[in-house]
Amino acid sequence: MLTDDASTRPQMRAALDITILRTLVMIVDSGGFTRAAERLGITQSAVSLQIKRLEEATGQSMFVREGRQVHLTSDGEMLLDYAREIVRLEEEARLRLVEPGERRSVSLWATEDIATAYLNNLQAASQRIALNVRSDNPASVVNQMAQGAFDLALVRREPGATRGGAWRHDLAWIEPLAWIGPVGTKTEEFSGRVPLILPSPPSIARQRMLDLVERERPAWRIVLSTTSLSMRLEAVRRGLGVSIAPRHTVPADLTVLEDMPPITVPALLAMARSRNSISSEARRIEEMVVSLLDQRLMRDRRLKES
């Protein structure tokens, strides 16, 4: 007969420090110890010391290092979920106690399809935060971010282009792309050149479409180019042509066209910040977006030390 002998179980050596738990979350979300230290405004050695104290308190290793990369251990992964929730609750309680009647504003830029596919439930979940999601003028989003017009942004980038520019890309997810058309569509049914329904530039999906058809299906024509997602989808529904969309965002009344040239290079969906230091409200929204995307998409890369 098995007994649960408390003397044989690992004992917690000290209470968990919320400051250290916040550091653990920051290491994961920012992509490593160095960038976590930059965001927290402390030295890298201080970050390392905090993690050492966490490991001493729990009796478990949080990270394992492979060359210049660090990865969470299974114990680290488990604790991370609790750490996120503890930090979230602490920030929410603090906001309500300090100014319980005020709604704090956070601005987030995202393309229309990203906002529709991933962020529908974000407004309701954000509670006392007044979230302003904008999808206007994608051509100038870089300049607007540089000027601090948005706290956060979700932008599509080419794989490998996760750094540089006017903001930081510390979080990225892989978005597999697919050709889409009306249910039952066969591309051989198109007479003559393949009709393309394109997003207006700048657009990762647009460039993927043009690169592929020029290489694989040289007979093609553009029938529509617009920034409006609803217009593109309606044109596809009416059978005017084919388009490209992330597989996770294909509407139920449309289908993936498997007989078109496969899109082997995905899009990269990256989280951007207009500055290194953001408000606790913006950080809360960022955490919620990260959680939503982690449920739908695969992270693009492991933690890397720079």
Image: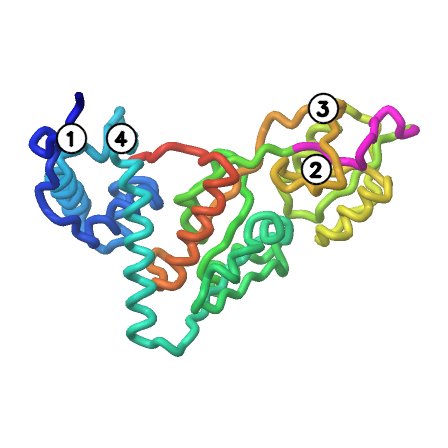
Of all residues shown, which one is farthest toward the right?
Answer: 191
Closer-to-camera residue (226/163)? 226
Locate the C terminus by quadrant. Answer: top left
Which residue is under mark 3? 261
Q: Amino acid at mark 4?
A: Thr
Is there any visible trace of residue 102 in the rendered image?
yes
The CA span between labels 4 and 1 is: 26 Å
Specify whether residue 306 is painted magenta. Answer: no
The CA span between labels 4 and 2 is: 37 Å
The CA span between labels 1 and 2 is: 56 Å
Which residue is under mark 1? 4
* Residue 3 located left or right of residue 228: left
Which residue is under mark 4? 73
Circle 4 crowding by C-alpha within 10 Å: few under 14, some 14–19, many from 20: some
Horizontal and vertical percent position of residue 113: 64, 49
* Residue 187 located left or right of residue 82: right
Horizontal and vertical percent position of residue 214: 75, 28
**151 above or below 244?**
below
The CA span between labels 2 and 3 is: 11 Å
Q: Earlier in the sequence, mark 4 or mark 3?
A: 4
Looking at the rendering, the stretch of residues picked out in magenta corresponds to 178-191
Q: Amino acid at mark 1?
A: Asp
Which residue is under mark 2? 244
- The residue depicted at 64 percent of the width and 44 percent of the height is 203
Q: Are marks 3 and 1 in contact (CB under 8 Å)?
A: no
